[in-house]
Amino acid sequence: MTHAKLFFLMALLTALIVAVGGLLGGSQMMLVALVFAALMNFGIYWYSDKAVLRMYRAQAVTREQAPELYEMVDRLRRRAGLPMPTVAVAPSDQPNAFATGRSPDRAVVCFTRGILNRVPREELEGVTAHELAHIKNRDMLIGTTAATMAGAITLLSRLVWFIPLGGHERDRSPLAGIALLIVAPLAALLVHMAVSRTMEYRADRVGAEISGNPLGLAGALGRLEAYAKRIPMEVNPAAAHLCIVHPLRGGGLVALFRTHPPTEERVRRLEAMARRR
């Protein structure tokens, strides 16, 4: 089922890229856009984990360097029935965490320095279980594909002001230009939002089952959300969707179009889950 979702997502966003290319330059540009999308898909599949870790300036750590962290991840990954992931630490002071990698065998769980220093053990276990749930659900590649291709569509759509539509100046249409500049990126963003929010809710539920403590994760989400509003994180927005809570500050329309679901609703669902146990 996961592979089917990944294929559908890649096909849908590839079709949007090709459509934008066709409006920009006719059939020749459609072919260029198709090749561009294929190369992107290849790069995402094979190199997304390395690219993400570079964006966060994260470094893998050994069991000897972080024995308590390793023991916790190892214990929870066995409960989840997963191979041992690579453990990495990013230098940011903002408490946060994410998982990346194309498969459970190539997975990485990354913690910021801030989360290791500021979050209680019980809540850190909830966060770790959430990230292991993403690995178990094979969410990382799907999320990275959606984010990267949505960004590519936005970039292509901006070329409307520099490239005559259809390859001829007389073919430039104000309405088509508006559609490319606004509608195409918005459509890609909505697809990405829908995919990301669904994955986060599911990872919360599965992560709570792995840790056996929904309230630990609920407490962590509330704490991390509060810290994210106070402590900035310098990271490429293309990788922001991976974090357990949105790491970039901003309200208004920025908050409206966040790929993460509202933290309050995530906490409410986890608290309801705890009451049912």
Image: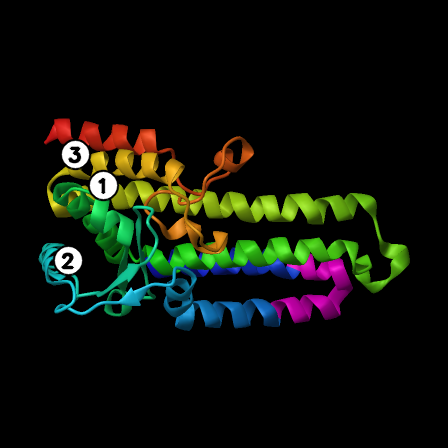
| Spatial CA span between label 1 and label 3 | 11 Å
Task: Give amino acid for label 3.
Answer: Leu
Crowding around mark 2 (Cα neighbors within 10 Å: few <14, some 14 to 19, many 20+) is some
The Cα–Cα distance between marks 3 and 2, rounded to whole angstroms, is: 20 Å
Question: Which residue is pictured at 71% across the width and 45% down the height?
Answer: 179
Say which residue label 3 marks.
215
User: Which numbered disc, 2 or 1, marks the residue that appears first in the sequence?
Assistant: 2
Return the mark for residue 205: 1
Residue 1 seen by the camera: no
Q: Secondary structure at mark 2?
A: helix
Please tell me whether residue 275 is drawn above or below residue 197 in the rendered image: above
Q: Which residues are magenta?
A: 19-34
Relative to the observer, which residue lies in front, 54 or 218? 54
Residue drawn at (15%, 63%), measured in percent from left and top?
66
Question: In the drawing, does residue 218 fall left or right of residue 195?
Answer: left
Q: Which residue is mark 2?
A: 69
Q: Residue at x 25, y 42 (%)?
A: 204
Q: Amino acid at mark 2?
A: Leu
